[in-house]
Image: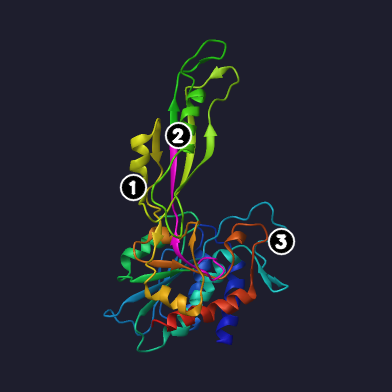
């Protein structure tokens, strides 16, 4: 186990050194392939998604998917360190993608490797190092699930401080358009879209969704952008608003859209309805295992690849979501060292 953990940390150090922005994960995919080859694990690759089945896979048994992603966002301008220099200082492993979600990825790869050669498991295991998570791309996890066997549930690796997220908010971004009449600012105009937007903003502010989730609370709607006009002396013909809606597990995205469309005082169009909320039953075996081990459970406000899958899943991994996408990103080495055995303890309760 110590050697496996040491190798996992070395894998993360190597991944940090390789640029792997979304759509550009070829080389990190190659490094992950190298891990599988060095451990005698047969694997498959579809574009930049690398995946493998446990050695004694049995189609008659239920299957657990272990998944995390190897793409990253681009480093922000606040970096003082080189984002591609993987260095350890005071127990912190620095580097782009170290926390989101490199720590979870290498931990789950190590866990899969631990189980790979074991016989007589109650469940099959599939490991998937997926691409394009940060951009919700078409060639990420959504492109792989249709070619995999039936999945009974998944562990999605994201930084959660090894707490178990048993529910996750969905996301809908709406484009709102308010039309008016363009005119010279010196003339009377009773059809100014900027003035008309006041009614729309009040409507948004007063939105109430009846169903409240135990773990995610209420649906949250937030105005994030307003755009209108480009000259001081011209009344514009339209105003645009961007509305960010975080959906709880009591609604589908389609249901939220239907509610808003019915009552909206303006044009409202969703960019996508595909990023739905998710949840897993509190009676599920993996949740029961978490209860026995004293793992804290919560509802996650942040989006992950859970939104792209339809089967039950939990989100759990080393690192802290608050560090994600931050300057001089890091993960504590001990977080990885502690995560691998905790994942194994959880799985041992059910497989």
Q: Quadrant of residue 277?
A: bottom left
Q: Local crowd at mark 1 within 10 Å, few (<14), some, or many (≥20)?
A: some
Q: Local crowd at mark 3 within 10 Å, few (<14), some, or many (≥20)?
A: some
SS class of the residue under badge 1?
A: helix
Depth check, mark 1 against mark 2: the one in front is: 2
Colour style of the rendered protein structure: rainbow
SS class of the residue under badge 3?
A: loop
How far apart are the alpha carbons under marks 1 and 2?
20 Å
* Residue 250, above or below 238: below
Marker disc for residue 81 = 3
- Badge 1 or badge 3: first in the primary sequence: 3
Question: Can I make out residue 173 in this image?
Answer: yes
Q: Where is residue 183? Give x, y as percent.
A: 50, 15
Q: Local crowd at mark 2 within 10 Å, few (<14), some, or many (≥20)?
A: some
Q: Where is residue 115? Give x, y as percent.
A: 44, 84
Q: Residue at x 42, y 56 (%)?
A: 213
For the view shown, which residue lies furthest in the left direction?
60
Q: Main secondary structure of the magenta part?
A: strand
- Badge 3 or badge 2: first in the primary sequence: 3
Residue named by callout 2: 203
Q: Quadrant of the C terminus?
A: bottom left
* Residue 117, above or below 206: below
Q: Nearer the viewer, residue 137 or 197?
A: 197
- Badge 1 or badge 2: first in the primary sequence: 2
Range covered by the magenta-colored residues: 158-175
């Amino acid at each position: 186990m110590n050697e496996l953990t040491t190798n996992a940390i070395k894998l993360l150090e190597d991944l940090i050194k390789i640029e792997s922005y979304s759509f550009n994960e070829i080389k990190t995919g190659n490094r992950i392939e190298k891990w599988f080859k060095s451990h005698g694990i047969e694997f498959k690759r579809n574009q930049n998604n690398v995946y493998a089945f446990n050695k004694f896979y049995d189609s008659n048994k239920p299957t657990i998917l272990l998944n995390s992603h190897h793409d990253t966002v681009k480093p922000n301008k606040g970096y003082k360190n080189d984002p591609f220099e993987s260095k350890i200082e005071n127990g912190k492993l620095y580097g782009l993608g170290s926390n989101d979600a490199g720590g979870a990825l290498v931990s789950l790869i190590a866990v899969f490797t631990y189980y790979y050669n074991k016989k007589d498991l109650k469940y099959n295991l599939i490991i998937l190092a997926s691409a394009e998570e940060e951009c919700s791309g078409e060639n990420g996890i959504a492109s792989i699930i249709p070619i995999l066997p039936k999945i009974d549930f998944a562990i999605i690796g994201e930084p959660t401080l090894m707490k178990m997220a048993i529910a996750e908010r969905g996301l809908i971004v709406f484009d709102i358009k308010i039309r008016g009449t363009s005119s010279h600012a010196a003339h009377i105009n009773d059809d100014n879209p900027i003035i008309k937007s006041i009614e729309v903003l009040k409507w948004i502010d007063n939105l109430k969704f009846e169903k409240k989730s135990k773990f995610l609370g209420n649906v949250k709607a937030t105005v994030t952008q307003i755009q209108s006009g480009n000259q001081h002396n011209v009344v514009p013909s339209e105003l645009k608003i961007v509305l960010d809606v975080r959906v709880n597990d009591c609604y589908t995205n389609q249901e939220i859209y239907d509610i808003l469309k019915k009552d909206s005082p303006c044009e409202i169009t969703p960019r996508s309805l595909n990023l739905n909320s998710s949840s897993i039953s509190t009676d599920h075996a993996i949740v029961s295992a978490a209860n026995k081990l004293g793992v804290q459970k919560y509802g996650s406000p942040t989006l992950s690849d859970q939104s792209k899958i339809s089967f039950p899943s939990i989100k759990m991994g080393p690192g802290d979501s608050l560090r994600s996408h931050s300057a001089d990103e890091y993960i504590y080495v001990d977080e990885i060292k502690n995560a691998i055995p905790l994942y194994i303890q959880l799985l041992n309760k059910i497989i």
